[in-house]
Amino acid sequence: MVGATGFSIGFFGPMILAPGANQGPLLGILITGPLGALLGLVIGVVQEVVGVRGSPADLLARRGLLSDGGRRVWRAVAALVAIVFLAGAAAGLWRGEPVGAVVRGVVGVALAWFAVNTRTGRGRIE
């Protein structure tokens, strides 16, 4: 998951921030994807050695750092960021930048889905 996240940020991030850059996706392919995979491996090994089970959200909930109020804050932040991305997608379509607009739209829809469909309770984000 960490590798996929690193790859996605490195691959799609330059498309959002600099749509005209033709070598932007190489950042995800050559740098952030492999580094994310390596970081995920390190996290997995540390979890096995320490004997910790569960997702980072589960661990934060067990420590009391991710209460129901904290989850609501994350959902609200996700909703606000989704609005920004969706507005950027609409503006990109208006300016005639289809690739950047589609990427912004997909990220915006994913964040909106998270904000609306994340269920809270029992110490987990499901």
Image (cartoon, grey):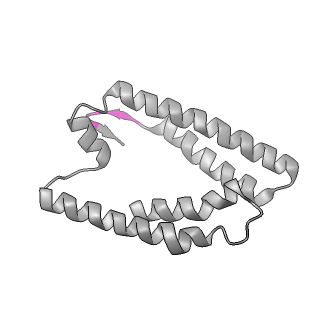
Q: Nearer the viewer, residue 21 or 52?
A: 21
User: Would you place residue 7 above or below residue 69 in this image?
Assistant: below
Determine if residue 22 is in view.
yes
The picture quadrant where one finds residue 29 is bottom right
Q: What stretch is highlighted in magenta?
A: 119-123
Which corner quadrant holds the C terminus?
top left
Q: In this view, does 81 lie to the left or right of 124?
A: right
**Residue in the picture at 74% in, 52% down:** 101
Q: Nearer the viewer, residue 112 or 77?
A: 77
Coordinates of residue 108 in the picture (x, y in percent): 62, 45
Q: Is the magenta stretch mostly helix, strand or loop?
A: loop
The picture quadrant where one finds residue 42 is bottom left
Coordinates of residue 70 in the picture (x, y in percent): 37, 29
Magenta stretch encompasses residue 122: yes
**Residue in the picture at 44% in, 72% down:** 34
The picture quadrant where one finds residue 20 is bottom right
Coordinates of residue 122 in the picture (x, y in percent): 26, 34
Q: Is residue 59 left or right of residue 79?
A: left
Coordinates of residue 121 in the picture (x, y in percent): 31, 32
**Residue in the picture at 22% in, 65% down:** 45
**Residue in the picture at 66% in, 43% down:** 85
Q: In this view, does 112 lie to the left or right of 103?
A: left
